[in-house]
Image (cartoon, grey):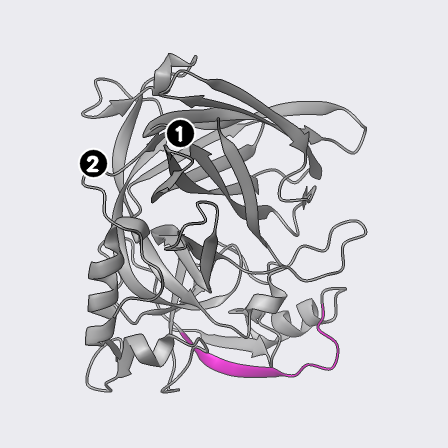
Amino acid sequence: MATCVARRALAVGSRWWSRSLTGARWPRPLCAAAGAGAFSPAATTATRRHLSSRNRPEGKVLETVGVFEVPKQNGKYETGQLFLHSIFGYRGVVLFPWQARLYDRDVASAAPEKAENPAGHGSKEVKGKTHTYYQVLIDARDCPHIVSKERGQTEPRSTEAVTFLANHDDSRALYAIPGLDYVSHEDILPYTSTDQVPIQHELFERFLLYDQTKAPPFVARETLRAWQEKNHPWLELSDVHRETTENIRVTVIPFYMGMREAQNSHVYWWRYCIRLENLDSDVVQLRERHWRIFSLSGTLETVRGRGVVGREPVLSKEQPAFQYSSHVSLQASSGHMWGTFRFERPDGSHFDVRIPPFSLESNKDEKTPPSGLHW
């Protein structure tokens, strides 16, 4: 029996800059509406033009928070690198990198070194390509502004968090560390700052130490290394799955969370993060989800419902992306998930977007999941 538990959503705010920044002159000043959590690397006149639009944070004044650097085309960003998220616009800092296998169904592949074809559910074999992701901290000042202004929706939503199984008898109990996210290399827009504490997060000064002789000038404390080592099995990002249907790109990242005993049986838990991106200029709205969940125990469950995490996000040119996290549990050590999202066009017509199939695999050398921050 599979169990889905919806948790958190992350929706794109207004995009105040172009993603194609690599052709610009660097370094460039980085400005923000003070306290607003929104940014523009464009010239002052362009920034003012955007602030005069409907997205303007009323009563806010632009202030410089740093200087953009040239994004890296090769190599990795180091621990302590400050950045803006190119899609969601929040300020953040890199903690450490992950080397993941990206299974991209939009890229044709032949004779893959390592391929996956989950349970043969009508999916083509896809080559897994190594891709760099980063564990990052999100600036708490920007979290309330990572919202989606959908039809009738005015409340801000919580930002991303990493969830763990609580270490006690309740097999369904979860706890979260807010303000943690996983960011793809191409979504990093690096910048520098003269502020010794440029990111507001309760773990920033616990994990990082300012050292002006280093570049970037924030180095890992021993607490960060210890936390990464002790929590590695439940933080590790290993596989990423991506597929595009009718210009809607779906990215899925699954994480194994651990196993609990319940009513004389074992219950295995996974978290999965899904990002929806509209690569076109046409407005669409997510209306329904349709999941198929296969367990190694032999069960196949179908889950249908309205929207995701209680929402029906609108994807437009101004707000092209939406990200959320959810959970699933199985009474078996492995399984697979796949399905579709149904979207609606402005004319009332519908179309289905494929969710790339992905595996739910448990760790062979099972350990007790963390019950809190381990130092």
Residue 20 visible (yes or no) = no
Kind of residue at badge 2: Lys
Q: Is residue 222 left or right of residue 315?
A: left
Q: Nearer the viewer, residue 116 or 196?
A: 116
Q: Which residue is mark 1?
A: 331
Give the residue furthest to the front: 264
Q: Which residue is mark 2?
A: 364
Give x and y (percent) for residue 78. Answer: 24, 66
Which mark is nearer the camera, 2 or 1? Answer: 1
Assign a secondary structure to mark 2: loop
Assign a secondary structure to mark 1: loop
Q: How packed is label 1: few (under 14 Cα within 10 Å), some, or many (20 or more)?
A: many
Q: How packed is label 2: few (under 14 Cα within 10 Å), some, or many (20 or more)?
A: few
Measuring 26% from the left and 68% from the top, which residue is drawn there? 79
Q: Which of the image's four quarters has the C terminus?
A: bottom left
Kind of residue at badge 1: Gln
Give x and y (percent) for residue 45. Answer: 63, 74
Which mark sits nearer the N-terminus, 2 or 1?
A: 1
Q: Nearer the viewer, residue 14 or 27?
A: 14
Give x and y (percent) for residue 65. Answer: 48, 81
Question: Which of the 4 quarters of the picture holds residue 108?
Answer: top left
Asked whether residue 120 is drawn in magenta, I would say no
Q: Is residue 56 above or below residue 331?
A: below
Stretch in magenta = 56-67
Question: Which of the 4 quarters of the picture holds residue 360?
Answer: top left
Q: Is residue 120 left or right of residue 178?
A: left
Give x and y (percent) for residue 232. Answer: 24, 54
Measuring 72% from the left and 65% from the top, which residue is drawn there? 55
Label 2 to label 1, Cα distance in Å?
Answer: 16 Å
Q: Is residue 190 above or below residue 114?
A: below
Asked whether residue 64 is drawn in magenta, I would say yes
Q: Nearer the viewer, residue 243 or 22?
A: 243
